[in-house]
Image: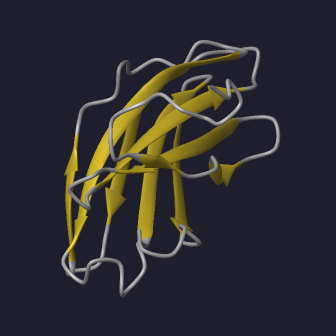
C-alpha cells in the first residue's frame, strides 16, 4: 500500500489544487478548495484569511455563477475574521448542467467592516480544472 497515493476522502471524489480566488495586499485572501464528487457535482470550500492586525467584522461572501450552473451556498462559519487567522470557511455546491463541457466560473462579492469602515470587494474566478 502506497501511503503517498493521496487516498482517503469520499469515494469517487477528486480534489483539485487549491486556488487563490481573491487576494488584497495586507488584508483579505480567499482560497478555494474544489472537489469533484462521484455524482458529478463540485463542492468548493472557501477559506478566508485576514492578514491584518485588526478584525474584519460583518463579513459576507457571495458568489454568482452562469445560468448553466446551479449553486447552493451554505452560510459562512463566522461573520468575524479575527486578525492574523484563516478560521472562517464557507461551503458551496455546484451542479454544471453541461457536465463540465462549459467550465465553472464564479463572480464574487465580498463585504466587511474594517476599523469602522465598510469595504466592498468584487472579483471573478475561473481556471477550475477541466470537467468542473
Q: Residue at x 20, y 56 (%)?
A: 39
Does 18 appear above or below 86? Answer: below
- Is residue 72 shown to the viewer in this render? yes
* Chosen colour scheme: secondary structure
Quadrant in which residue 76 is drawn: top left
Does 107 appear above or below 73? Answer: below
Q: Position of residue 104 (x, y in %)?
A: 41, 72
- Is residue 117 shown to the viewer in this render? no
Q: Residue at x 76, y 15 (%)?
A: 53
Q: Residue furthest front?
A: 1
Numbered label tally: 0
Q: Position of residue 111 (x, y in %)?
A: 45, 42
The residue closer to the viewer here, 1 or 51, is 1
Instruction: Tell whether 90 sits left or right of 69.
Output: right
Q: Quadrant of the C terminus?
A: bottom left
Q: Quadrant of the N terminus?
A: top right
Q: Position of residue 20 (x, y in %)?
A: 66, 51
Does 8 appear above or below 111? Answer: above
The residue closer to the viewer here, 97 or 80, is 97
Instruction: Tell whether 6 sits left or right of 44.
Output: right
Q: Position of residue 77 (x, y in %)?
A: 35, 20
Q: Residue at x 66, y 40 (%)?
A: 29
Amino acid at each position: 500500500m502506497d501511503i503517498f497515493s493521496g487516498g482517503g476522502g469520499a469515494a469517487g471524489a477528486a480534489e483539485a489544487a487549491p486556488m487563490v480566488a481573491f487576494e488584497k495586499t495586507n488584508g483579505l485572501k480567499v482560497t478555494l478548495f474544489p472537489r469533484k464528487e462521484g455524482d458529478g457535482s463540485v463542492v468548493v470550500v472557501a477559506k478566508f484569511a485576514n492578514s491584518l492586525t485588526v478584525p474584519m467584522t460583518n463579513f459576507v461572501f457571495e458568489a454568482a455563477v452562469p445560468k448553466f450552473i446551479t449553486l447552493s451556498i451554505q452560510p459562512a462559519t463566522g461573520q468575524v475574521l479575527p486578525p492574523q487567522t484563516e478560521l472562517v470557511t464557507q461551503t458551496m455546491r455546484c451542479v454544471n448542467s453541461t457536465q463540465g463541457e462549459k467550465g465553472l466560473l464564479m463572480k464574487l462579492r465580498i463585504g466587511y467592516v474594517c476599523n469602522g469602515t465598510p469595504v466592498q470587494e468584487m472579483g471573478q474566478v475561473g481556471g477550475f480544472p477541466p470537467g468542473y
